[in-house]
Image (cartoon, rainbow, N blue to C red):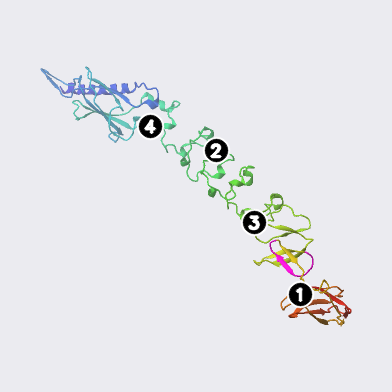
């Protein structure tokens, strides 16, 4: 009886193993990447002996029965669980059932798909457990190592497109895994390499060839002027007309940025420079004219052929005035027209009233002669203008009011020798 039972169990295990391996080798997938399951087929045997008169019947197939099947893939025999799932197939009339490992109810797994498991390690074991009553009471029927299948021999000759970049996770391919020259820049598609994929300092500007980076490759705002090192942009790098003065913000160019003699005022400045910017506001000035300004408005011109006098205006600024109407008496200043008018003082008695004749006598060198002339109407502090109608021979003549109604005329000889002006010296055109 023992011998018969032992042989039956051996036959049971033999049937399970042969059926499993044969089914695994009959996969019909077209691409390696499509393999998401492993076919498994076996006959379920009733583990409860049946009592028949004269003989005990063991190993009877379970037909038309819903059973429970649990598959556990471990790293090594009874090692860490890499995949575990359960199935509830129904056997046929011969006790045969078929399931796909990878399509069951996943109860424990370290991977998303079977294909993700490290099959390259070749140390996976498959433990098969069956619950004949599907009540969660599983019994181990086998625990064997996975062996090579036809697809395993295919790994040395992977078909084109078997592995796409979409299947490669981030950081799976390291720089040290890529041979020098294995990937050329011509093989890298646009936008394949992102800024966040480039480690800081991995690419130096000295490694970037001329014209590698184009203007259209640089996003707006990606490079700020504060990030451009000194002397990075050279004059020969800027096309003519690439930058217009209207694009340069105020205070962008400082005085220290402009080299000496860079700007030639003679050849570069073409428009008239306004008075507000230190210019004259005039394109040309007529011949024999001078510029006249009052410090607040535009420059003006004045002919140098006229008599010019310098006076201080009411604000204390020196201004030029034009002397008009000849030399007469009585001074009047017009700040509006910038002219000086000298008008005559009306003194009754006719035109010769102001002509006075007298004799100075001999005046030694370094000496002087004084003549006191009565003149009604003059007062202390008045300014007296006198003109001699005779040749003074280098003698200096001055006049001033000594007391009311009197004018002192002084002749001073500093010529180096005595002078005698004669006995008929005429003083005319008194004015105040």
Q: Mark 1 or 4 closer to N-term?
A: 4
Viewer-side label of 2, 3: 3
Give the camera-side residue of 326 and 182.
326
Q: Which residue is mark 3?
A: 276
How crowded is the residue under tag 1: few (<14 C-alpha within 10 Å), some, or many (20+)?
some
Q: Which residue is mark 4?
A: 120
Numbered circle sitting on residue 384: 1
Q: Is residue 330 magenta?
A: yes
Distance from Cα at disc 3 to Cα at disc 4: 86 Å
How crowded is the residue under tag 4: few (<14 C-alpha within 10 Å), some, or many (20+)?
few
Numbered circle sitting on residue 222: none
Q: Is residue 15 left or right of residue 268?
A: left
Q: Mark 3 or 4 closer to N-term?
A: 4
Q: Could you say where residue 348 lies in the image, as x and y percent from the top left?
A: 79, 73
Q: Secondary structure at mark 4?
A: helix
Viewer-side label of 3, 4: 3
- Residue, x 74% and y 69% (percent of image)? 331
> Main SS of the magenta segment?
loop
- Residue, x 34% and y 30% (percent of image)? 114
Which quarter of the rendering shows the N terminus?
Answer: top left
User: Quarter of the image holding residue 316?
Assistant: bottom right
């Amino acid at each position: 009886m023992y011998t018969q039972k032992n042989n039956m169990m051996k036959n049971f295990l033999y049937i399970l193993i042969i059926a499993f391996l044969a089914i695994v080798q009959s996969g019909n997938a077209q691409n390696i990447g499509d393999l998401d399951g492993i076919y498994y087929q076996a006959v379920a045997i009733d583990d409860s002996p049946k009592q028949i008169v004269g003989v005990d019947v063991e190993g009877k197939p379970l037909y038309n029965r819903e059973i429970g099947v649990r598959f556990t893939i471990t790293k090594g025999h009874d090692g860490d669980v890499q995949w575990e799932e359960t199935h509830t197939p129904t056997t046929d009339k011969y006790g045969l059932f078929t399931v796909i490992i990878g399509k069951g109810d996943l109860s424990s797994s370290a991977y998303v798909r079977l294909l993700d498991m490290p099959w390259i390690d070749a140390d996976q074991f498959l433990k098969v457990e069956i619950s004949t009553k599907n009540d969660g009471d599983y019994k181990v029927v086998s625990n064997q190592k996975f062996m090579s299948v036809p697809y395993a021999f295919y790994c040395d000759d992977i078909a084109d497109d078997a592995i796409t970049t979409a299947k490669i996770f981030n950081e799976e391919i390291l720089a040290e895994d890529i041979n020098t020259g294995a990937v050329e820049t011509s093989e890298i598609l646009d936008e394949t390499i992102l800024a966040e994929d480039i480690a800081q300092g991995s690419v130096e500007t000295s490694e970037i060839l001329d014209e590698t980076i184009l203007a259209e490759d640089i996003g707006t705002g990606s490079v700020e002027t504060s990030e451009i090192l000194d002397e990075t942009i050279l004059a020969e790098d800027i096309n003519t007309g690439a930058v217009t003065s209207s694009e340069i913000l105020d205070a962008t160019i400082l005085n220290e940025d402009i080299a000496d003699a860079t700007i030639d005022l003679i050849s570069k400045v073409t428009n008239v420079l306004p008075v507000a910017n230190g210019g004259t506001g005039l394109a040309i000035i007529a011949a024999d004219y001078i510029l006249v300004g009052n410090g607040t408005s535009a420059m003006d011109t004045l002919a140098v052929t006229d008599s010019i006098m310098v006076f201080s205006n009411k604000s204390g600024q020196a201004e030029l005035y034009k002397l008009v109407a000849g030399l007469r008496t009585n001074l009047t200043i017009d700040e509006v027209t910038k002219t000086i008018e000298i008008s005559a003082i009306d003194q009754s008695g006719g035109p010769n009233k102001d002509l006075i004749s007298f004799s100075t006598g001999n005046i030694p060198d370094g000496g002087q002669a004084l003549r006191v002339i009565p003149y009604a109407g003059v007062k202390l502090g008045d300014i007296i203008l006198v003109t001699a109608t005779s040749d003074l021979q280098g003698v200096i003549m001055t006049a001033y009011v000594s007391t009311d109604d009197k004018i002192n005329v002084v002749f001073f000889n500093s010529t180096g020798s005595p002078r005698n002006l004669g006995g008929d010296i005429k003083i005319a055109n008194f004015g105040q």
